[in-house]
Image (tube, rainbow, N blue to C red):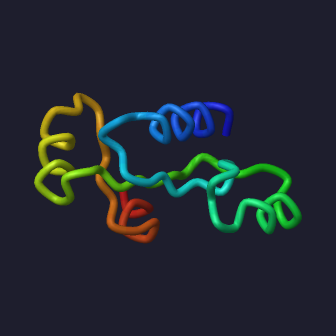
Amino acid sequence: MRNAIAVARFLESHSKVERVYYPGLKSHADHQLARKQMRGFGSMLAFDMKGGLPAARRFCDRVRLFLMAASLAEWSRW
């Protein structure tokens, strides 16, 4: 969870990132609800890149260690 919030904060301030989805961020729409319902915010996050799909594909092509998962159900089969 500590790593996730650090990554989320980094991404939130990055010039090429449009939006970060992580309930531990104060900017998340449900941050206050998550604080009430959860003891922590977990380790999963998602983000949108400026430039849409072409930018996201360039990013994924250049990352050295990366697991792309459409959903948790898909990932859990690994």
Please state, as top left, top right, bottom left or bottom right, where the N terminus lies in the image. top right
Q: Residue furthest front?
A: 15
Q: Position of residue 37 (x, y in %)?
A: 85, 66
Q: Is residue 37 above or below residue 6?
A: below
In the image, 78 versus 14, the foreground residue is 14
Determine the residue positioned at 16% across, 33% down: 62
In the image, 29 versus 21, the foreground residue is 29
Residue 1 lies left or right of residue 73; in this view the side is: right
Determine the residue positioned at 49% across, 41% down: 12
Q: Position of residue 54 (x, y in %)?
A: 11, 54
Q: Position of residue 69 (x, y in %)?
A: 33, 59
Q: Is residue 51 above or below residue 29?
A: above
Please state, as top left, top right, bottom left or bottom right, where the C terminus lies in the image. bottom left
Residue 37 lies left or right of residue 49; in this view the side is: right
Determine the residue positioned at 52% across, 57% down: 21
Determine the residue positioned at 36% across, 45% down: 17
Q: Position of residue 45 (x, y in %)?
A: 51, 52
Query: Could you tell me how many numbered marks the image carries?
Result: 0
Residue 9 lies left or right of residue 57; in this view the side is: right
Res 46 → quadrant: bottom left
In the image, 58 versus 70, the foreground residue is 58
In the image, 31 versus 63, the foreground residue is 31
Residue 6 lies left or right of residue 11; in this view the side is: right
